[in-house]
Amino acid sequence: MAVVHDTTMTPGKLELLAGWLPRQPWYAGSGGELRKAGGFRLDDPAGEVGIEFMAVGEGGHVHLVPMSYRGAPLDGAEHALIGTSEHGVLGRRWLYDGVHDPVLQAQLVALLEGRAVAQAQSVSDMPEKTVESRYTGEPFPGGPAAVVNGPDGTELQIPGRPAVRVLRVLRPDADAAGAAGYVAGEWTSEDGGTVRGPLVIVD
């Protein structure tokens, strides 16, 4: 179980994302102020990597940013680095676009297959009951997935299995009907209302 520390990060996550987010091919905003709009965590069984799926609001848009937090650089993932931050308890942390991190990939698959439980974003050892997941296909093999970023989001491609689509711009009307699997959850709209819809779809 990962421990959520009541401490600071300098610079903060939204500060780092303010420079990183507009450079992504799926970015739908206009450079406005970012706000935290929801999300959840997953535990790394080895207890080494922090995993968070953060919903980030900007005006009327909400982007989904899976992030992994590491105590040392991830080899070969320089292109996926969001930035570094000083954690008040853990020291320097390297923050990555988590779709490129094999630990996050493995735990997302575990969530889809029912072997992992989504955790609350800001409280230790508390399941996030608003997150629902389902997958009806053959089990995914181990090993890293190929990552394909495009204007519509990010695909994790595993040979012989359907693509796992991470929906980078969240919409309550995103169509998951007939999909082999999905992860659904809640986020906060610009006016403060609660919105529910798909976060990840397995085609």
Image: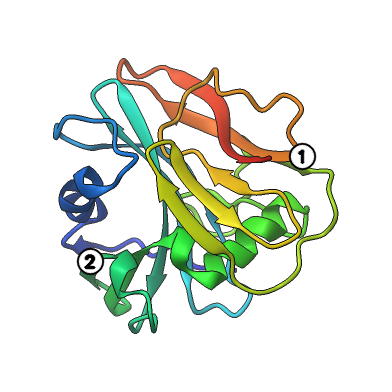
Residue in view at x 36 percent, y 37 percent: 63
Vertical placement of residue 194 versus 73, above or below? above
Type of residue at label 1?
A: Ala
Q: Quadrant of the image for the C terminus?
A: top right
- Give the residue at mark 2: 83
Q: Secondary structure at mark 2?
A: strand
- Circle 2 residues within 10 Å: few <14, some 14–19, many ≥20: some
The mark nearer the N terminus, 1 or 2, is 2
Label count reads 2
Residue type (three-letter) at the residue carrying disc 2: Gly
Residue beneath the point at 55% across and 17% down? 173
Q: Which mark is residue 196?
A: none
What percent of the width, then of the height, locates residue 19? 15, 51
Task: Say which of marks 1 and 2 sits in front.
Answer: 1
79 on left or right of 163: left
* 85 in relation to 134, above or below: below
- Dots 1, 2 in contact, CB < 8 A: no
Q: Quadrant of residue 13?
A: bottom left
Q: Position of residue 46 (x, y in %)?
A: 60, 80
Q: Residues within 10 Å of mark 1 (few under 14, many from 20)?
A: some
Q: Is 66 located above or below residue 95 in the figure?
A: above
Mark 1 = which residue? 180
Q: Secondary structure under badge 1?
A: loop
Residue 76 visible in the shown view: yes
- What is the x, y in percent for residue 54? 41, 46
Residue at the spot 34% in from the left edge and 61% down from the top edge? 6
